[in-house]
Image (cartoon, grey):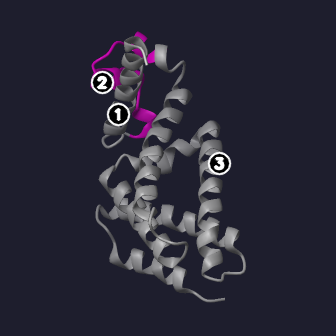
Amino acid sequence: MSIRVEAAAQTRAALVDAGLRLADRFSIAELSANRVVAEAGVSKGTFFHHFPNRVQYLLALHAGFHDRLDAEMAAAIADLPPGRDRLRVAQQTYLDGCRRNRGVRGLLLEARAERAITDRINARNEALADVAAADFRAMGWSHPTESARLWIGMVVEAALLELDQAAASSSVRAALDQYLTARE
């Protein structure tokens, strides 16, 4: 990779990181290019060089957060066979990652006002459901894909509940575990 390409990638990452930090303090609607460039310490022209419009920036912000979280979850479950324990570890990793990044509320909720982001969320959730379906299949559930989709929705809602409480919720996490132990 050339120095120029590497520098561009670092600048783009710095802009995304700045947005994630700002999302802790401001709503997605308040996340302006001016705030982002001030936080990142770059010019407004640099912002628009990397992101031609706000939607493209929000997509990058959403992807940046979720790609990191997906990597954490993949590492946490790498050595676990499909099944209940793997799902529990994945959901705990997801919830803990969301709590570490309070700005995720905007990415989980507010950003859905943008159709392109909703489409990306739906695609990501479908891909995750395809992976988690193997876990539900291993547990003997007769509708593994649908069960995985519902579980993903519950885990996201649990993350929002914990963000509202500003703490991990043992009762919310117990309810998620209860879903995983349900029998048909």
Q: Marks 2 and 1: CB-CB under 8 Å?
A: yes
Q: Quadrant of the N terminus?
A: top left
Tell whether 113 sits left or right of 163.
right
Mark 2 lies on a secondary structure that is helix
Tell me the magenta residue range: 27-48
Mark 1 lies on a secondary structure that is helix
Mark drawn on residue 17 = 1
Task: Classify residue 25 by image quadrant.
Answer: top left
Of helix, strand and loop, which mostly describes the magenta segment? helix
Upstream in the sequence, badge 2 or badge 1? 1
Can you give x and y, in whole percent of width and height, for residue 98 in the image? 38, 55
| Residue pictured at 41% horizontal, 65% vertical | 161
Q: What residue sits right under mark 2 in the picture? A: 40
Can you give x and y, in whole percent of width and height, for residue 47 in the image? 42, 18
Can you give x and y, in whole percent of width and height, for residue 3 in the image? 37, 13
Question: Which mark is nearer the camera, 3 or 2?
Answer: 3
Which amino acid type corresponds to the residue marked 3 in the rendered image?
Ala
Q: Label 1, label 3: how many angstroms apart (C-alpha)? A: 23 Å
Mark drawn on residue 123 = 3
Question: Label 1: how many residues lie within 10 Å, few (<14), some (14-19) or many (20+)?
Answer: some
Which amino acid type corresponds to the residue marked 2 in the rendered image?
Ala
| Residue pictured at 72% horizontal, 80% vertical | 142
| Residue pictured at 36% horizontal, 38% vertical | 20
Question: Label 2: how many residues lie within 10 Å, few (<14), some (14-19) or many (20+)?
Answer: many
Q: Label 2, label 1: how many angstroms apart (C-alpha)? A: 8 Å
**Vertical relation: 34 (above or below) 108:** above
Upstream in the sequence, badge 3 or badge 2? 2
Residue that extends furthest to the right in the rendered view of this protein = 142
Q: Label 3, label 2: how many angstroms apart (C-alpha)? A: 29 Å
Front in this rendered view, residue 35 or 120: 120
